[in-house]
């Protein structure tokens, strides 16, 4: 049996009291930094770049994202916020990003421990969302294709 979304939220809140050791790294000037991988500090920004598939009208894509996709998936996973952005200046004009703002590395790993893997908790949330999540996910992938992605983890000076 899958946990309910409310149970998952309570689990995340409970786990937020746990202090997880940080991973150390040294910069060239020997200043010590810590990757913010505990619950209480730092964020993870997942930057996923997309291009529209051939023949897709940008206005159709933008209308879909704002009217159908965002209302379904925004706020779906506690501790994760999503934002779709369009390049307006610079080297990626007209390209699209999904920016995942995740409250901590722990929360990211709670749902997605490795690339392409979802935990039972993430699957339960998706299942609770039902057919509507599957429909908007499939439609998004018909309109756009991910070309690259990186998760960025906040660094904090010790």
Image: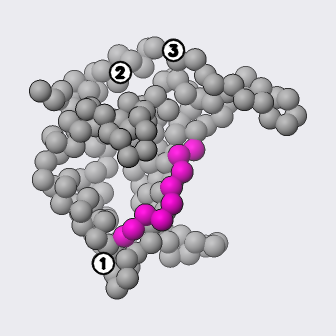
In this rendered view, identify the residue nearer to me: 83 or 127: 127
**Separation of marks 3 and 1 at Cα, in angstroms:** 45 Å
Element on which disc 1 rests: helix
Q: Which mark is residue 113?
A: none
- Crowd tier of the residue under label 1, counting other residues whose Cα lies within 10 Å: few below 14, some 14–19, many 20 or above: few
- Are dots 3 and 2 in contact, CB under 8 Å? no
Query: Where is mark 3, residue-wise?
Result: 19
Q: Which residues are magenta?
A: 144-152
Work out which quarter of the rendered image holds the C terminus and state it.
top right
Please check the rendered image and state whether residue 150 is part of the magenta-colored stretch, yes or no: yes
**Separation of marks 3 and 2 at Cα, in angstroms:** 13 Å
Q: Which mark is residue 13?
A: 2
Query: Where is mark 1, residue-wise?
Result: 60
Q: Position of residue 32 (x, y in %)?
A: 77, 26
Lower position in the chain sequence, tag 3 or tag 2: 2
Magenta span: chief secondary structure: strand
Element on which disc 3 rests: loop
Whether residue 153 can be seen here: yes
Work out which quarter of the rendered image holds the N terminus and state it.
top left
């Amino acid at each position: 049996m899958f946990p309910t979304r409310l149970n998952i939220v309570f689990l995340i809140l409970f786990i937020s009291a746990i202090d997880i050791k940080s991973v150390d790294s040294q910069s060239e000037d020997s200043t010590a930094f810590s990757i913010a991988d505990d619950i209480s500090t730092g964020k993870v920004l997942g930057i996923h770049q997309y291009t529209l598939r051939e023949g897709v009208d940008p206005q159709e894509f933008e209308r879909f994202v704002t009217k159908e996709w965002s209302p379904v998936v925004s706020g779906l996973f506690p501790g994760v916020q999503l934002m779709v952005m369009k390049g307006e200046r610079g080297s990626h004009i007209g390209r699209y990003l999904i920016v995942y703002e995740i409250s901590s590395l722990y929360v990211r790993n709670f749902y997605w421990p490795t690339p392409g893997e979802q935990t039972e908790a993430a699957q339960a949330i998706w299942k609770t969302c039902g057919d509507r999540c599957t429909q908007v996910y499939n439609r998004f992938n018909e309109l756009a294709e991910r070309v690259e992605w990186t998760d960025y983890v906040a660094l904090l000076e010790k």
